[in-house]
Amino acid sequence: MVDTSAGSSYIDLLENQLGSEWTAIRKAQENTVQRRRELEELFCQQNSPDTSVVVFGSVARQEVTCSSDLDWILLLDGPAAPEHKEQEREVERVLASRHFAEPGKSGVFGKMVGSHDLIHNIGGEDDRNSNTTRRVLLLLESLPIGNREAYDRVRRQVVRRYLRDDRGILYGGKNVRIPRFLLNDFTRYWRTITVDFVYKQRTDDKKWALRNAKLRMSRKLIFAAGLMNCFFCHLDSAAAEAISVAKSDSKDVSLLTAYLENQLALPPLEVMAKACVQLSIAHSTAQSLFDSYNRFLVIMDDPEKRSELQRTHTHEDLRHSKVWKEMGGISRQFHGSLVTLFMKGNESLCELTMEYGLF
């Protein structure tokens, strides 16, 4: 176990181990600090215990670049009241006054969302794509702004629901302890967004290259981090007592809930760095993984290159775009690094991937 209590992050430790300097990752983290400070100032008066302003995307991942947008919801955990609609409109007004880009047209973000569906509608016909997306991203890349009471309650109950309904965790006889209900929902989300990408390609082909780059990099990253967090329940010695208590006669999942809450609070890149450090992943694999993601953030923070990706969507555009060709090389390197990490980097991790990540 590596001690990070002195203030060093796992990215710090890995960067030092490799003798690397990921300047774009560091710049994005610094940009994120400034963006979060700005948002906190805007919503510092948001003190209702039954609502939280929650943001997603690059702000939550600590990857803010020059043109990062802002997806948000007003999370409601309590009895409905007319005032909540006023709060929703106020959030929208405040963000618009500071010229934050509006959320996309899908209707997933930019609105008030109640906790009931997030907690109780996991699976089944009522678990629509929008509900799955909000719930999974609430776990994998979200950040409360201002008062976080409602956010913490809902997030905890979502995690608790995944664990309490997982009979393998509570009653399974195997020595391996993986929260498969949670893992399967992460996997379902990843497959859903890859299918929806093609749907969007058919209905609205604009910004194809930019959306594709994000799918192959940042979207894939949060899925990989989600898998890793599930695998850490078995691989991380810090989870051993929590698993033991959950398996005991008490079937108490509170310790495991707390462990997963802490894990899921880590930004995705930090999760992957923790895996590289704790699982003694080959330096070449870790270097390739973080180098490629650093290069991706360089492009995302370059106004000209990002603008070219936004304009690139036809086959003719793709053939002539140098940025698209560069992005293709970066995404192939990143994908190859993830395959090596999960399938070849550590024997125990490889076994878990084969046993639980595929089927």
Image: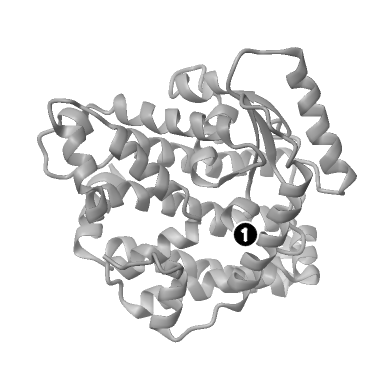
Residue drawn 69% across the image and 42% down it: 71
Residue 346 at x, y percent in the picture: 24, 66
> In front: 335, or 159?
159
Which residue appears farthest toward the right when viewing the image? 97
Find residue 161 and report its horizontal and vertical position in percent: 38, 26
| Vertical placement of residue 80 versus 149, above or below | above
Q: Is residue 353 above or below residue 22?
A: above
Whether residue 254 can be seen here:
yes
Residue positioned 66% across, 13% down in the render: 80
* Label 1: which secondary element: helix
- 215 on left or right of 240: right
Q: How is the image coloured?
A: one colour
* Residue at far bottom of view: 19
Percent across and percent down for residue 215 are 58, 53
- Quadrant in the picture for the N terminus: bottom left
- Res. 182 image quadrant: top left
Q: Quick one: 251 or 209, which is closer to the camera?
A: 251
Q: Residue at x 29, y 38 (%)?
A: 255
Which amino acid type is marked by label 1? Ala
Total numbered circles: 1
Seen in the picture, residue 2 relative to 114 is either above or below; the reply is below
Is residue 340 something one can see in this rendering?
no
- The residue that label 1 is drawn on is 213
Identify which residue is drawn at 41% across, 35% down: 185
